[in-house]
């Protein structure tokens, strides 16, 4: 893949007219929304988009409306030149990188709020986060007008929110979930991993380890959710600098908490390792 020079589009109008041309030429548009600082996980999303489309558009936009007041918006890692080179190597046709002032002008007023899904998991400790995500993704969809869009399953709740929004608002866009890409040691890839100090690595790995242990326990017959969660908490808190935000076992569709594992069950967790908030999840049943 690759070879052609990538097109970098900064304005909403240019993106819309470029997409219009692609559609007029009969091209199927695949879309990968990102906040940049691309890693192997993003590249896997791009490859999946290529498989479902003729032209792939990647957006790079650190969206202010999905960060809380005490979160890492200002510190979020950014490197547009490197990102464009990586996207170009993957054969991406367009990088769309709008200005925040153009996306959210001073009189901006419209937000998308889902009723139930944000009441769970990350939505509890990050109020407004999923409104920010749904809103920016809807806006990006209107700029890029994709036929298909790819989101990682690492952000499981985000994927659920996007699927729900697309269904509720009758958007004619295929949403594709991509499996989580992990480092060789099991750490789920994330741009925020760049914040981790080497000595925090074992603590960061305890998220994945605790998920695997829970899955094994379920396979061995453990059904009680509080037993499974306690074991995960013990595993994680055995490491210094860890603070559990949540560990939940829930219905994979509604995200409602479960008390026993009798059918499909998702284990999801969010843990702070030092100042870095990490999330991960795993289906406990096949
Ligand atoms: O997953 C992300 O990187 C962001 O939440 C997204 C989907 C690009 C919206 O800003």
Image (cartoon, helix red, strand yellow):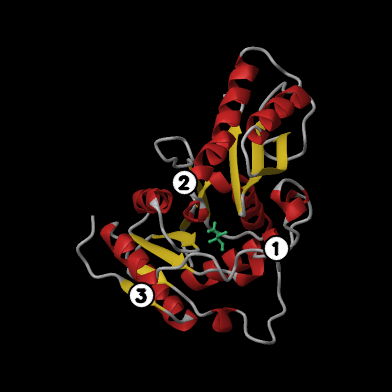
Q: Position of residue 224 (x, y in %)?
A: 76, 20
Q: Quadrant location of ligand 1?
A: bottom right
The answer for how far apart the CA atoms under marks 1 and 3 are is 27 Å
**Circle nearer the N terminus (3, 2):** 3
Q: Residue furthest top?
A: 220
Residue 285 seen in render: no
Relative depth, front residue between 110 and 268: 268
Q: In this view, which residue lies farthest toward the left?
A: 3
From the viewer's perspective, tell me whether residue 261 is left or right of residue 215.
right
Please name the residue that numbered disc 1 is placed on: 131
Q: CA distance from mark 1 to mark 2?
A: 34 Å
| Above or below: residue 264 compared with residue 2 | above
Which label sits on residue 198? 2
Question: Residue placed at 75% from the left, 53% from the top?
Answer: 125
Task: Report which quarter residue 18 is drawn in.
Answer: bottom left
Ligand 1 within 8 Å of disc 2? The answer is no
Query: Where is residue 203, by image quadrant?
Result: top right
Callout 3: SS: strand
How packed is label 2: few (under 14 Cα within 10 Å), some, or many (20 or more)?
Answer: few
Q: What residue is disc 3 on?
A: 8
In the picture, measured across the screen, residue 195 lies left or right of residue 271, that is: left
């Amino acid at each position: 893949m690759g070879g052609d020079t990538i097109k970098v589009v900064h304005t909403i109008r240019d993106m819309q007219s470029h997409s219009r041309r692609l559609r007029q030429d009969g091209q199927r548009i695949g879309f990968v929304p990102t906040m940049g600082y691309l890693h192997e996980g993003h590249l896997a999303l791009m490859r999946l988009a290529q498989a479902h489309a003729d032209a792939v558009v990647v957006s790079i936009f650190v969206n202010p409306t999905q960060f809380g007041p005490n979160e890492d918006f200002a510190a979020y890692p950014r490197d547009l030149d490197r990102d464009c080179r990586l996207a170009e190597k993957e054969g991406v046709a367009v990088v769309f990188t709008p200005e925040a002032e153009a996306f959210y002008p001073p009189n901006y007023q419209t937000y998308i709020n889902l009723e139930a899904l944000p009441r769970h998991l990350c939505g509890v400790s990050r109020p407004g986060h999923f409104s920010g995500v749904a809103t920016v993704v809807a806006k990006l969809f209107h700029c890029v007008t994709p036929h298909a869009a790819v989101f990682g399953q690492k952000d499981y709740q985000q994927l659920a929110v996007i699927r729900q929004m697309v269904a509720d608002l009758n958007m004619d866009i295929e949403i594709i979930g991509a499996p989580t890409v992990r480092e060789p040691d099991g750490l789920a890839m994330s741009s925020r991993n760049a914040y981790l100090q080497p000595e925090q690595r074992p603590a960061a790995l305890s998220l994945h380890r605790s998920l695997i242990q829970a899955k094994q326990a379920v396979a061995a017959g453990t059904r009680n959710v509080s037993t499974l969660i306690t074991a995960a908490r013990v595993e994680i808190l055995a490491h210094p600098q860890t603070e559990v935000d949540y560990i939940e076992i829930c219905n994979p569709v509604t995200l409602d908490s479960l008390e026993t594992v009798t059918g499909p069950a998702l284990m999801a967790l969010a843990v702070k390792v030092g100042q870095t908030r990490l999330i991960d999840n795993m289906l406990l049943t096949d």
